[in-house]
Image: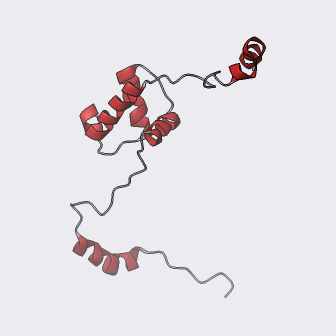
Amino acid sequence: MYRWAKQLSESGRRGLKKVGRAGRKPRLSEADLRRIETLLKRGPEASGFDTKLWTSWLLAEVIKDTFGVEYHPGHAWRILRQLGWTVQRPTGRALECDEAAIRRWKHRRWPVVKKTLKTPVGQ
């Protein structure tokens, strides 16, 4: 606000139009963001992680290691959104899944294991 008041007194109302952006300047440049997007496209495994899915925690770690800039995972999520990335969840089941075994278990074992409601006391 002090800056705006100074600008107003020095340049008048016209000077207020070119005050500039408010808030802290970004710590990552546009080139850094493009490099992050390249890293994202390669996947977390290329960055040395044991998973195929990006999380904001992983991205925050990659940004810290690559650019020396520390972000909270919540802010790393904002960077993902800024780059146009959305939440992705794996679809389908694991390749190792045996559908026939699951069906057998549901029909034979589950009824035995499942808890049944006992008759309330006093009835």
Residue pushed farthest top? Answer: 10
The mark total stands at 0
Indicate how the structure is coloured in the image: secondary structure
Q: Where is residue 117 in the image (x, y as percent from the top left)?
A: 55, 79
Q: Where is residue 68 in the image (x, y as percent from the top left)?
A: 41, 19
| Residue appearing at x 39%, y 35% in the figure | 58
Residue 8 in view here: yes
Relative to residue 10, is residue 87 drawn left or right? left
Residue 48 in view here: no
The quadrant of the rendering that contains the N terminus is: top right
| Residue appearing at x 43%, y 36% in the figure | 57
- Whether residue 2 is situated above or below residue 104 in the rendered picture: above
Q: In which quarter of the image is residue 52?
A: top left
| Residue appearing at x 78%, y 13% in the figure | 9
Q: In which quarter of the image is residue 35?
A: top left
Q: Position of residue 27 (x, y in %)?
A: 48, 22
| Residue appearing at x 42%, y 49% in the figure | 86
Q: In which quarter of the image is residue 53?
A: top left
- Whether residue 28 is situated above or below residue 52 in the rendered picture: above
Q: Where is residue 10 in the image (x, y as percent from the top left)?
A: 74, 11
Of 66 and 102, the residue lying toward us: 66
Relative to residue 97, is residue 75 drawn left or right? right
The quadrant of the rendering that contains the C terminus is: bottom right
Of 121 and 2, the residue lying toward us: 2
